[in-house]
């Protein structure tokens, strides 16, 4: 089961799990909003066994300390990100990870993937079982090899489509901020995201969540107009800035590459 609880510069939080165990990728909205939106989806925080933090920007960590303490949820975060974010986390609930490390929580395996972004130690994540992989690829300056290779192995993915190039160029942002966004350590444009999808989508990808849309330099319609005509059998979901998406069930279809089968020991099916 997969859902976006919020996606954008005002806060990011993504739910990935099954009927027994789940994780959150980032906790950038308040504890109260996280609780409310999960309840509206029929989800329980008792099943969340870890919060994985991508980087220290406030829209990704704003609610993590209170959420972790209130519900006794472990937080997985690099030492540099914790320090840079000045997070007041309970030491007993804080666990450091390293690049490319895979952390197993019951039936879930979460792999940390380094990415390019203007943060101290940023990572994407892939959450997997023996049969299904779901990736979270946002806040990436360029579609680097790490992003491309892991995206190509996912049954579902959150992929950033942050800005329309013309809207950014002709909008009111200061020149320095425009260059920060499009300069290789900022965010992916709609066209960059589309290129990743067209050139590296696996045949078994059933769902694509387009995430982290800019409020000032993009619109859902622009994104849909690009992706819907070429989506094929992949369902396109636009993750909104101020509410949760529906809850989606991801199931393995088609043939998985041998390298994915070999990467994990056999476990119970996930997301069924």
Image (cartoon, rainbow, N blue to C red):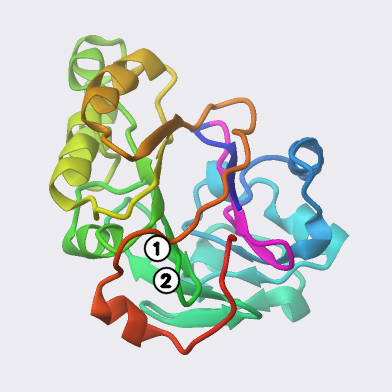
Give the x, y percent position of residue 195.
15, 40
Q: Which quadrant holds residue 161?
A: top left
Picture layout, residue 93 above or below residue 181: below
Which residue is at a point 55% across and 42% down the rendered structure image? 12
Give the crowd class for mark 2: few <14, some 14-19, many >=20 residues within 10 Å: many
Q: Which quadrant holds residue 50?
A: bottom right
Circles 1, 2 touching at the beta carbon (< 8 Å): yes
* Residue 90 placement, left or right of 238: right
Tag 2 residue: 112
> What secondary structure is marked by label 1?
strand
Which residue is at a point 26% across and 35% down the rendered structure image? 232
Which residue is at a point 63% across and 50% down the rendered structure image? 27
Write the start and end of the magenta stretch as one range: 10-26
User: Separation of disc 1 and disc 2 at Cα?
Assistant: 6 Å
Q: Is residue 188 visible?
A: yes
Picture layout, residue 36 above or below residue 2: above
Q: Which quadrant holds residue 39?
A: top right
Give the x, y percent position of residue 191.
18, 31
Q: Magenta stretch: residue 109 in it?
A: no
Q: Magenta stretch: residue 14 in it?
A: yes
Frontmost residue, 206 versus 122: 206
Tag 1 residue: 123
> What secondary structure is marked by label 2?
strand
Picture layout, residue 230 above or below residue 152: above
Frontmost residue, 175 versus 4: 4
* Residue 15 placement, left or right of 253: right
* Residue 250 placement, left or right of 227: right
User: In which quadrant of the rendered image does the C terminus lie?
Assistant: bottom right
């Amino acid at each position: 089961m997969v859902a976006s609880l919020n996606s954008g510069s005002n806060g990011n939080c993504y739910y990935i799990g099954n009927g027994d165990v789940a994780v959150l990728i980032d906790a950038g909205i308040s504890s109260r909003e996280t609780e409310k939106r999960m309840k509206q989806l029929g989800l329980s925080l008792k099943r969340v066994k870890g919060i994985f933090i991508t980087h220290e920007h406030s829209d990704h960590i704003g609610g993590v300390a209170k959420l972790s303490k209130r519900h006794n949820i472990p937080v997985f975060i690099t030492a540099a990100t914790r320090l840079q974010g000045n997070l007041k986390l309970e030491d007993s609930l804080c666990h450091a990870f390293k690049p490319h490390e895979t952390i197993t929580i019951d039936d879930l395996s979460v792999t940390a993937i380094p990415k390019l972004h203007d943060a101290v130690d940023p990572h994407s994540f892939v959450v997997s079982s023996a049969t299904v992989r779901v990736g979270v690829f946002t806040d990436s300056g360029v579609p680097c090899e790490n992003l491309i290779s892991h995206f190509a192995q996912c049954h579902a993915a959150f992929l950033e489509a942050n800005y329309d190039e013309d809207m950014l160029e002709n909008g009111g942002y200061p020149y320095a901020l425009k260059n920060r966004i499009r300069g290789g350590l900022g965010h992916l444009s709609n066209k960059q995201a589309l290129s990743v999808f067209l050139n590296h989508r696996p045949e078994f990808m059933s769902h694509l969540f387009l995430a982290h849309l800019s409020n000032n330099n993009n619109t859902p319609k622009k994104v849909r107009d690009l992706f819907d005509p070429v989506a094929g059998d992949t369902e396109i979901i636009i993750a909104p800035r101020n509410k949760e998406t529906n809850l989606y069930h991801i199931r393995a279809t088609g043939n998985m590459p041998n390298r994915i089968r070999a990467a994990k020991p056999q476990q119970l099916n996930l997301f069924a």
